[in-house]
Amino acid sequence: MSTSQRGSIRTAIAGVGNCASSLVQAVSYCRVKGADAVGVSFPELGGYRPEDIEIVAGFDVDRRKVNRPIGEAVLADPNCTEIFWDKLDDQPARVHRGPDLDGVSAFMRNQPPELSFVPSDEPPLSKDQIVDALKDAKAEVLVIFLPVGSTQAVEFYAQCALEAGCAVVNGIPVFLASNPTWAKKFESAGLPILGDDFKAQFGATIVHRTLAHLADMRGVKIDRTYQLNVGGNTDFMNMMDMDRLALKRESKTEAVQAAMDARLADGNIRIGPSDYVPWLHDRKVAYVRIEGQLLGGAKTSMEVRLEVEDSPNAAAMAITAVRCARIALERGLKGAVPEASAFLFKHPPEQVDDPEAHDMLLAFAGDAGQ
């Protein structure tokens, strides 16, 4: 395995679903392809490359993944993301049986097993056992890829990371880095946390933000907008439970509102997942509409349809965030890291326009000349 002179970044993953699958595939892919790897955000960042990430532990609840090497587990049902790299023998880290908590929704428990989670009969590890597993693996960074709405589970793993001395990268819309209480906990523990809720590499939110910002720059008055998303992976299935969707909708809505000069009234903006279509698998289809007024009130409207493979879109940001977390650890940064979070996450501690956030990230990594 090729790594930079600064060594590997020992990384654990909570939630071995589709996003974890894309992340694990990406690491192995980049180890082989190196500079020829396609579609990598920031091929080198702060002296680290994607292939410097070393997956050392996984945590999941599904019986088809628990106690298997993570290179096998990420290809098991109900994962359905595109397999762009299947040579995963270099990914031997064990997947441990984590606690269910609120990670398996009631809706999920009544769906076909090939599409939904099947909890393992293995006894779940306690908090102390998970802390020990992180320490035994010498994990430096914990990436949280749990299902949307898993507030108890996310906070449980965040606490485990605190006690194990791990930085956290929070990929989902349960607010940690942007929550002052949790940010303070990490600051007190002397550990960095990045989050919350990954922006996709080229997804609906970043496209929506860009179009809204463009309209503002050109003097267009935006009257109303929506972004409706459908998909077929377990995340979309999970979000059929409307109670689990609230923070996701808040995260995506705030990401777009923050990109506009004037906030829209709640009744004039609607953003979020809207339906689950099983045959789409990991494809996400987004419909974005913006209505507004040109000079003199002349009406204009725009509709965009975007189709992406959902999980590689998030994994591209994860391989950047993990490297940023390692840089933050090396510098002794504590608590939320806004300069590394604004470009990568929908709900960061501080919302910043994307071009400025891009420059902030490079400056943070010491790569401002790129």
Image (cartoon, rainbow, N blue to C red):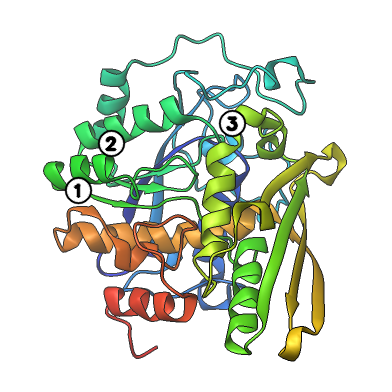
Q: Are marks 2 and 1 in contact (CB under 8 Å)?
A: yes
Q: Secondary structure at mark 3?
A: helix
Residue at the image position 35 percent from the left and 62 percent from the top? 350
Q: Alpha-carbon distance for marks 2 and 3?
A: 24 Å
- Who comes first in sequence, dot 2 or dot 3? 2
Query: How many neighbours does mark 3 have within 10 angstroms: few (below 14), some (14-19), or many (20 or more)?
Result: some
Residue assigned mark 1: 191
- Who comes first in sequence, dot 2 or dot 1? 2
Q: Which mark is residue 161?
A: 2
- Residue toward you, 282 or 93: 282
- Left or right, residue 246 beside residue 175: right
Give the amino acid type for the residue marked by disc 2 in the picture.
Answer: Ala
Give the amino acid type for the residue marked by disc 3 in the picture.
Answer: Arg
Residue 166, position in %: x, y? 25, 42
Q: Which mark is residue 280?
A: none
Query: In this view, which residue lies farthest toward the right?
Result: 279
- Left or right, residue 114 beside residue 118: right
Q: Which corner quadrant of the image does residue 107 belong to?
A: top right
- Who comes first in sequence, dot 1 or dot 3? 1
Residue assigned mark 3: 244
Q: Nearer the viewer, mark 2 or mark 3?
A: 3
